[in-house]
Amino acid sequence: NGKNEYYVTYNPDFADITMQIEKADYSDQSVWTTLQSGGQSPVSKLEAITDMEIGVKAVEYFIRTGELYPGIDWMHQL
């Protein structure tokens, strides 16, 4: 169908910023992380892991199983 479909981490601590994300004011540091990723679009705090240990576990789990780590909330995006 030509559409991209993917999953991103979901941080429920920032569930209330959904409307600000749609405004795309990338200078608003209450909404966007300071992550720099070589040309990638800015990352919202809603999609950012704040616990690096669990982030590492999620990556290791995916490498071993090919599945999403069940210890993190995920958002399905189209």
Image (tube, rainbow, N blue to C red):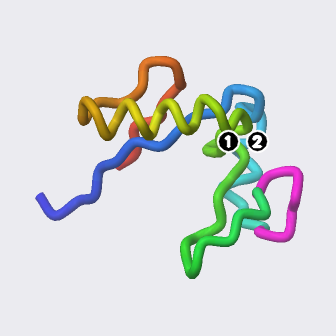
Compared with 40, 9 (above or below) is above
Q: Which residue is mark 1?
A: 46
| Image location of residue 69, percent across then percent down | 42, 26
Q: Residues within 10 Å of mark 1 (few under 14, many from 20)?
A: many
Q: Residue furthest left?
A: 1
Q: Secondary structure at mark 2?
A: helix
Instruction: Indicate the position of residue 34 as horizontal and vertical percent values.
Output: 78, 63
Magenta segment main secondary structure: loop
Q: Quadrant of residue 23?
A: bottom right
Residue 22 among those drawn in magenta = no
Q: Residue at x 64, y 32 (%)?
A: 53
Residue 27 higher or lower than 54, as above or below: below
**Which badge, 1 or 2, comes first in the chain's sequence?**
2
Q: Is residue 55 left or right of residue 77?
A: right
Q: Is residue 35 shown above or below 62?
A: below
1 or 50: nearer the viewer: 50
Which residue extends farthest bottom? 39
Q: Do the CB atoms of the residues marked 1 and 2 lie less than 8 Å apart?
A: yes
Mark 1 vs mark 2, foreground winner is: 1
Pick the residue in front: 72 or 27. Answer: 72
In the rendered image, the residue lying farthest to the top is 71
The location of residue 66, given as percent across then percent down, is: 24, 35
Residue drawn at x 65%, y 45% as measured from the top left: 48
Q: Is residue 26 above or below residue 29?
A: below
Identify the magenta region: 26-32
| Residue 29 point in image, percent of width and height | 87, 59
The residue that label 2 is drawn on is 17
